[in-house]
Amino acid sequence: MVYGTLWPTQDGWANMARYAGPAGESWSYQKVNLAAHERARLTAGDVLPVFEVPGLDAALGVQLCRDLRFPEQWQALCRRGAQVLCFLTNATNPRDRYDVWRTHLISRAAENQRWVISANVASPQQCSPSMIVAPSGEVVSECPNGASTVITASIDPSAISDWYLSQARADVVEVSYKR
């Protein structure tokens, strides 16, 4: 299970994704790009980890909320081996547009040719969908806006590709991971 939470750290509190596995294994990702209202209260992470998940047969990268607006982070995760990208958010800001967040999620899947699994809080005010997007950009499962339900899809690892990433012109623009 991957879930979002506020988590105590030695420097205060962090916006975090946590993984709890069936054999007691666990890991966490600390949100890198904090929103303006979070910066005074939370500590930003500085690592973009890629995780192995037993039974998934694919490495997992995780992004939280505002991280969606930074496609270079998603690309860095993919270049480091992430094959499935999990996105968790509590996006209910009425100023944010649902169709923009939805388009970003589809783009992150298609531009990186990875599966994207997105989960948002079930709220009538949500502005980001809960959905599963194939590496082609096809939405294979989606929760109706504001609904509380379970969505599922079979993830085919053979659909994952590095075709686009391998064509990037590193002599012009290069995304690198500094950790």
Image (cartoon, rainbow, N blue to C red):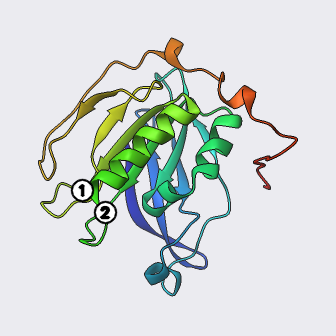
From the image, state whether disc 2 or disc 1 is nearer to you.
2
The x and y percentages for residue 103 are 38, 46
Q: Is mark 1 on a helix, strand or loop?
A: loop
Give the vertical position of 38 relative to 24 (above or below): below
Q: Is mark 2 on a helix, strand or loop?
A: loop
Dot 1 amino acid type: Val
Q: Foreground residue, 36 or 137? A: 137
The x and y percentages for residue 165 are 68, 31
Q: Name the residue under label 2.
A: 91
Q: Foreground residue, 88 or 74? A: 74
Give the vertical position of 122 relative to 23 (above or below): below
Name the residue at 44% across, 15% down. Answer: 156
Residue 121's label in the rendered image is: 1
Q: Give the position of the C terminus as an image quadrant.
A: bottom right
Name the residue at 38% across, 52% down. Answer: 88
- Mark 1 is surrounded, within 10 Å at the Cα level, by few (under 14), some (14 to 19) or many (20 or more) other residues, namely some
Q: Foreground residue, 101 or 121? A: 101
Name the residue at 14% across, 53% down. Answer: 146
Residue 142's label in the rendered image is: none
The x and y percentages for residue 167 are 74, 28
Name the residue at 29% across, 38% down. Answer: 131
